Amino acid sequence: MLRRRLSAGDRHSLLRSFRAIFLFLAFRYRQIYHNSGKIAR
């Protein structure tokens, strides 16, 4: 009973944290990509 509730909550929080990390990585990757492009030029 408790385990099921915990797993459900963990899944939700995990999804939110994963999405936040993905957005952060995408933002950083885009910054680095633009910076490298500027340096190349």
Image: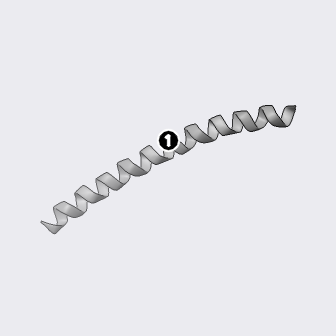
Q: Position of residue 5 (x, y in %)?
A: 79, 31
Task: Report the amino acid beneath label 1.
Answer: Ala
Q: Is residue 26 left or right of residue 13?
A: left
Dot 1 falls on a residue whose secondary structure is helix
Q: Position of residue 33 (x, y in %)?
A: 27, 59
- Which residue is pictured at 31% across the width and 52% down the height? 30
Up/down of 1 relative to 38, above or below:
above
Who is closer to the viewer here, 40 or 6?
6
Q: Is residue 37 left or right of residue 7?
A: left
Instruction: Tell me residue 17's x, y (percent).
Output: 56, 41
Q: Tell me where residue 16 sits by quadrant.
A: top right
Q: Say which quarter of the image contains residue 10.
A: top right
Q: Residue at x 84, y 37 (%)?
A: 3
Residue that numbered label 1 is attached to = 20
Q: Quadrant of the C terminus?
A: bottom left
Q: Specify the quadrant that holds the N terminus.
A: top right
Residue at 23% from the left image edge and 56% from the top image edge: 34
**Is residue 39 left or right of 11 when viewed as pictured?**
left
